[in-house]
Image (cartoon, rainbow, N blue to C red):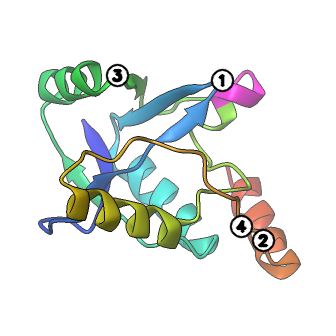
Amino acid sequence: MHVLLFDTGSDQEGIHSLEINGQTVVLLFEDPDDAERYAGLLEAQDFPVPTVEALDREELEGFCAQAGYEARFVPAGFLPRSDEDRLLIAPPERNMDVTHWREQEAAAEADGHRLEAEAAPAQELDPELEAFRRRLEGLL
């Protein structure tokens, strides 16, 4: 399986996740090209560029279960059938403010506590960037 990781190998390493219906979801891509495409769409939204990493499915599912996350398998050639399914192949229009997330994590480490997932203010997207994202999605 392939997942998207941020700050790979650092103390700030994190896994890309989505908030869907109040549940934190980690995407497990079967096809590395699908993971790379998703990473490119995140980059087009001025999100930090994640690294695509191949990891064992059982380990990923175990990590997600232990952390209280839902692991969602995205098979090769996946075609969405609903708005929720579409989030498995293209990031949402609004993303968590990563700067805010990193500040929270640093504060939690200073306090010796594990960071709890919190809703952060969403970033407004530039209309030009939004048009570019739509063109990329149209390639699907």
Q: Which residues are magenta?
A: 81-85
Secondary structure, mark 4, is loop
Position of 63 compared to 122: left or right?
left
Distance between the alpha carbons at the discs numbered 2 and 3? 30 Å
Q: Which corner quadrant holds the N terminus?
A: top left
Residue 21, numbered label: 1
* CA–CA distance in space, label 3 to label 1: 14 Å
Residue annotated with mark 3: 68
Identity, as a three-letter code, of the amino acid under mark 2: Leu
- The answer to whether residue 84 is above or below residue 129 is above
Q: Report the Cα–Cα distance between label 1 and label 4.
A: 19 Å
Q: Amino acid at mark 4?
A: Gln
User: Could you tell me the amino acid type at mark 3?
Assistant: Gly
Residue placed most toward the observer, 71 or 55: 71
Distance of label 1 from label 2 (alpha carbons)? 22 Å
Q: Relative to residue 138, is residue 127 depicted above or below?
A: below
Would you call the spot at circle 3 few (<14 residues within 10 Å), some (14-19), or many (20 or more)?
few
* Disc ID at residue 125: 2
